[in-house]
Amino acid sequence: MLVAPDKFRGTATAADVAAEVAEVAVGLGWSAVALPLSDGGEGLLDVFGGADRSSTVTGPLGTPVTARWLLRGGRAVIEAAEACGLLLAGGAEGNDPVRATSAGVGDLIAEALRAGAAEIVIGLGGSACTDGGAGALDALGAWSPDWPGFGATRVTVCCDVDTRYVDAARVFGPQKGAGADEVAHLESRLQDTRARLRERWGLDPHELPGSGAAGGLGGALAVAGAELTRGIDHVADLVDLEQAIAAADLVITGEGRLDESSLQGKVVGGVIDRAEALGVPAVVIVGIADPSVRVGVPVHSLTATCGAAAALQRTRESLRVVAADVLARAQPTA
């Protein structure tokens, strides 16, 4: 059996979820493999074994923060949320959506380049900024015509949305604390930065699906030479997800909240699609599920089984209860 979940945001990491469900499975006689996943949001570091470095960088509101990152086997992994995360800014209530900057992500990319990384993988989820990536490019010195670019280093930017560059203000600004006037200001600023990017690189970020991820950071890095990709697809390739599914007799995936977006570039949809293509049965365990969403496989909710309070406050315990219930109905393969 393969346990391949995303995080349950705010209550359990993907690694925690995978470990708990796998332990229950082994106790019930299954042979279980735990494979935590990420679509490019928070938790990307866990997919590759966790951070092994930290750097002091510019935080989302300009003050220094300590950001964790990873460099192993020539591959650097960076989570934008570690440097410019909304939680670092105090959530939507504490954030200044106009002032928030992506500079810290540029600082981390520069650190990885100096360290000799052959590949840099960047996850964009959870950011506080809508600066169009201008801050990150400033930190890299990328606006200068003398900037050498990323050189021989392959830079892959993972996102889980299709939102385009200028649309980031309207789609994500309110989630980051922006009111109507601030959204209009951010949209105008994104148009200005879009023009600067076209002038500097001759490419229009708004033409790229996903370029609005992290408030336009995805589009800025893409025109500067990075590859912008759907995060679950890139992560799946790096961890050989299809091979792991093919070797399993059952796949369990999940996330904190199942909704319409779960099937649009997220971990749950990516795992279900691959399991279906390979003819392997799949089950989804979530914190809470939108009852209107149909995924084509059984869905089990911690909230429905254990109650909302337990799902939020005793997530690991609730996971074990639900996993035991799910697996008691299935028969392990010898």
Image (cartoon, rainbow, N blue to C red):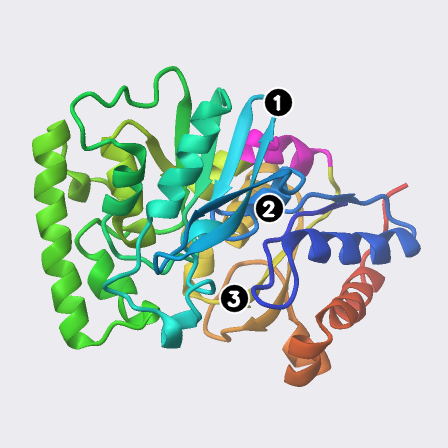
Q: Position of residue 54 (x, y in %)?
A: 57, 42
- Judge from the rendering whether residue 200 lies leftward or rightward of residue 130; answer left or right: left
Q: On the image, numbered disc 1 is attached to which residue?
A: 73
Foreground mark, 1 or 2?
1
Foreground mark, 1 or 3?
1
Badge 2 amino acid: Leu
Density class for disc 1 (Cα within 10 Å; few <14, some 14-19, many ≥20) is: few
- Judge from the rendering whether residue 297 lies leftward or rightward of residue 152; answer left or right: right
Helix, strand or loop for disc 1: loop
Indicate whether residue 240 is drawn in magenta: yes
Q: CA distance from mark 1 to mark 2?
A: 19 Å
Q: Residue 269, can we see it?
A: yes
Helix, strand or loop for disc 2: loop
Q: On the image, numbered disc 3 is attached to which residue?
A: 258
User: Given the current orientation, which residue lies at the most extreme top position?
Assistant: 152
Q: CA distance from mark 1 to mark 3?
A: 35 Å
Density class for disc 2 (Cα within 10 Å; few <14, some 14-19, many ≥20) is: many
Badge 3 amino acid: Leu
Q: On the image, numbered disc 2 is attached to which residue?
A: 37
Which image quadrant is residue 173 in? bottom left
Q: Position of residue 252 (x, y in %)?
A: 68, 53
Q: Earlier in the sequence, mark 1 or mark 3?
A: 1
